[in-house]
Image (cartoon, grey):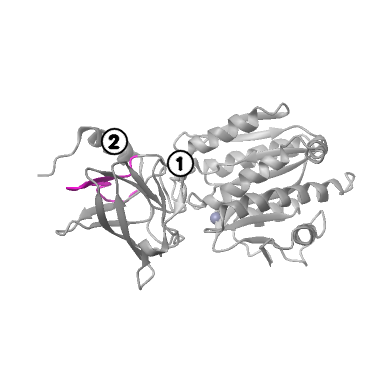
């Protein structure tokens, strides 16, 4: 019988109970390496060694399909001896969306070398060649940006004199949903992130964007004097902590719950909006940070009149004029009726309501270079708006 290390047995109880309905063994103990995902955002569903000693890992979604096929995986290899290891990583009900990233400390990440990773012919898995040393090795679909990352946000930005850190309420499992707010005049802007747990490149953009808006520059100070900010960087903390592909623990895609408001995570943001509306405040813009195949802004169609008018097209034109190399597409869609944040905020408030999507594999430096430019041009454009409108 396989012996289970005592600390893993305890962790299985703790983490296993908290996870979604994915039947699996969650770790495996081989001759040369112990494999597990007992850390925040960690997830492997099934794990086994073949007779030859190769490692096979299978990843399932947190809910039965239909679910967006964005298989999140993140696990740690704890070598017992140095050597080479073949790993077969397979996704059920999803394709190999995220190119594997590797880390020796869980903080610094790099994309795996193309020579070490082969995409399976059917596109639903990877065959990976690994060289194990003596220390642990993390393999993950994207960088691990979990609660520590967001707590660092709150520490960094909360130290700015006019910024307040608050907890809007709790997720389904009781994790805090925190916000950064500033108090300007009666107009405000809402920034949201991480409705979808694996969409890490969007989180990287949002951090750089927020840093620019909260910076100590003439532009940012003038902006914050006039506009208040409501910034909710981690809307789905349970999904992020549990390594979900898409949903919260209620099995709901939160970006399909704007309007129905069946989930605590969306409801508590809606409550904030209502309170501000009752106090006579006017929302001017909503930006919702996500990730997809490439850099794209989903905006209202040109014939859908927003107030301010033509915001999205002007914003993106000015940014492109200032930085011609900036690589973003605009997709202007009429309201599809889907209960996503973009449609909800436009329909309810008539404002520009934009999904800010980064490519999954967009160069991270490029993300942190472009986000401040978008932030500056957003501030300039909103400052031109007649406050009386
Ligand atoms: Zn998304």
Name which residue lies at 66% across and 57% down.
343
Name which residue lies at 14% across and 58% down.
51
The answer to whether any part of residue 318 appears in the image is yes
Q: Position of residue 240 (x, y in %)?
A: 46, 44
Q: Position of residue 83 (x, y in %)?
A: 24, 51
Q: Is residue 118 magenta?
A: no
In the displayed orientation, state which residue is furthest to the left: 1
Q: Position of residue 330 (x, y in %)?
A: 69, 65
CA gap, disc 1 and disc 2: 22 Å
Name which residue lies at 18% across and 58% down.
50
Q: Is mark 1 within 8 Å of ligand 1?
A: no
Q: Are marks 1 and 2 in contact (CB under 8 Å)?
A: no
Q: Secondary structure at mark 2?
A: helix
Give the side of residue 213 with respect to residue 102, left or right.
right
Q: Which mark is residue 68?
A: none
Q: Is residue 25 magenta?
A: yes
Q: In the rendered structure, which segment of residues is drawn in magenta?
A: 21-38
User: In the rendered image, which residue does mark 2 sit on?
Assistant: 11
159 versus 74 height, above or below: above
Magenta region, mostly helix, strand or loop? loop
Name which residue lies at 55% across and 47% down.
194
Mark 2 neighbour density, 10 Å: few (under 14) some (14–19) many (20 or more): some
Residue closest to the eye, 339 or 189? 189
Going from the N terminus, do you reach mark 1 or mark 2 first?
2
User: In the rendered image, which residue does mark 1 sit on?
Assistant: 107
Question: Where the N terminus falls, by quadrant?
Answer: top left
């Amino acid at each position: 019988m396989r012996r289970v290390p005592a600390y893993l047995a305890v962790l299985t109880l703790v983490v296993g109970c908290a996870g979604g309905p994915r039947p699996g063994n969650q770790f495996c103990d081989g001759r040369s390496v112990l494999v597990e995902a007992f850390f925040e955002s960690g997830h492997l569903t099934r794990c086994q060694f073949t007779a030859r000693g190769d490692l096979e890992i299978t990843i399932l979604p947190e809910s039965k399909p239909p679910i967006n096929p964005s298989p999140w995986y993140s696990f740690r290899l704890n070598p017992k001896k140095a050597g080479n290891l073949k790993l077969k990583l397979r996704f059920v009900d999803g394709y190999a969306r995220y190119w594997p990233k590797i880390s020796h400390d869980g903080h610094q990440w790099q994309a795996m070398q193309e020579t070490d990773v082969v995409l399976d012919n059917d596109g639903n898995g990877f065959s990976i060649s690994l060289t194990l040393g003596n220390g642990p090795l993390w393999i993950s679909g994207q960088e691990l940006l979990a609660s520590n990352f967001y707590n660092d946000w709150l520490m960094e930005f909360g130290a700015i004199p006019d910024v307040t850190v608050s907890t809007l309420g709790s997720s389904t499992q009781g994790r805090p949903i925190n916000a950064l707010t500033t108090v300007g005049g009666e107009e405000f802007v809402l920034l949201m992130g991480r409705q979808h747990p694996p969409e890490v490149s969007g989180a990287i953009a949002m951090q750089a964007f927020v840093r620019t808006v909260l910076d100590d520059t003439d532009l940012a100070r003038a902006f914050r004097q006039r506009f208040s900010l409501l910034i909710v960087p981690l809307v789905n903390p349970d999904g992020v902590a549990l390594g979900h592909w898409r949903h919260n623990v209620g099995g709901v895609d939160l970006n399909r719950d704007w309007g129905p408001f069946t989930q605590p995570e969306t409801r508590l943001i809606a409550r904030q909006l209502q309170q501000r509306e009752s106090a006579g405040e006017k929302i001017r813009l909503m930006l919702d940070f996500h990730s997809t195949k490439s850099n794209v802004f989903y905006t209202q169609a040109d014939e859908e009149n927003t107030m301010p008018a033509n915001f999205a097209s002007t914003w993106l034109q000015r940014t492109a004029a200032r930085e011609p190399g900036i690589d973003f597409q605009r997709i202007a869609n009429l309201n599809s009726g889907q209960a996503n944040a973009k449609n909800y905020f436009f329909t309810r408030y008539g404002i520009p309501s934009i999904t800010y999507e980064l490519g999954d594999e967009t160069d991270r430096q490029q993300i942190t270079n472009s986000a401040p430019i978008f932030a500056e041009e957003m501030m300039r454009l909103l400052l031109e708006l007649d406050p009386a409108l």
